[in-house]
Image (cartoon, rainbow, N blue to C red):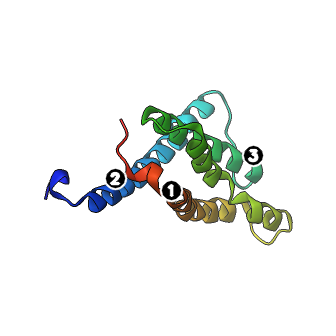
Amino acid sequence: MTDMTLPPQARSWRRFAFHYVEMIIAMFVGMFVLDLGWSALGVNLSYTADPELAYLLMAFNMSVGMAAWMRVRGHSWLPVLEMCGAMFVPIVPLFPLLWADVIDGMTVMIVSHVAMFPLMLAAMLWRRDEYTHAHH
């Protein structure tokens, strides 16, 4: 079934799902490409030695990738910033646990990556109309 033969509601949810996948790809592209750039500049943070800075840099890299792709696709700044916020929100409960030696830096990295996916989905559902209509 082509996109045009689907009912309008199915087309909008297909666009929503496609956008979610695009954001995941853009997030990981930003993380990997910018990490290569930081490494070339001699910035090599470790989740064991520098967990807070390593996480913040990773979240920044992911945010740059997503923000760039969202702006290319015609999204306004508010949804862009909300999606980027999903990269940073996991630190709210995790950093205090790290500082209290309840978890280590690698756990912060793993749990935060897992948390980002439902947080991105929540941001998208919050502005469902933003993500169900066609963009350029």
Q: Name, please, the residue furthest toward the right.
A: 100
- State the CA–CA distance, disc 1 to disc 2: 12 Å
Q: Quadrant of the C terminus?
A: top left
Residue at image location 70% in from the left, 46% down from the top? 56
Q: Quadrant of the N terminus?
A: bottom left
Q: Amino acid at mark 3?
A: Leu
Instruction: Give the label on residue 70, or none.
Output: none
| Horizontal side, residue 106 vs residue 123: left or right | right
Residue at image location 28% in from the left, 62% down from the top? 10
Quadrant position of residue 110:
bottom right
Instruction: Give the label on residue 15, or none.
Output: 2
Label 3 sits on residue: 53
On the image, the x and y values in percent for residue 80 come to 56, 42
On the image, the x and y values in percent for residue 79 come to 56, 46
Please report whichever mark, 1 or 2, sits nearer to the chain's N-terminal start.
Answer: 2
Q: Amino acid at mark 1?
A: Met
- State the CA–CA distance, disc 2 to disc 3: 35 Å
| Horizontal side, residue 96 vs residue 9: left or right | right
On the image, the x and y values in percent for residue 125 come to 50, 61
Q: Residues within 10 Å of mark 3 (few under 14, many from 20)?
A: few
Q: Is residue 24 visible?
A: no
Question: Residue 131 versus residue 112: which sits nearer the camera?
Answer: 131
Please report whichever mark, 2 or 3, sits nearer to the chain's N-terminal start.
Answer: 2
Please report whichever mark, 1 or 3, sits nearer to the chain's N-terminal start.
Answer: 3
Q: Amino acid at mark 2?
A: Arg
Label 1 sits on residue: 124
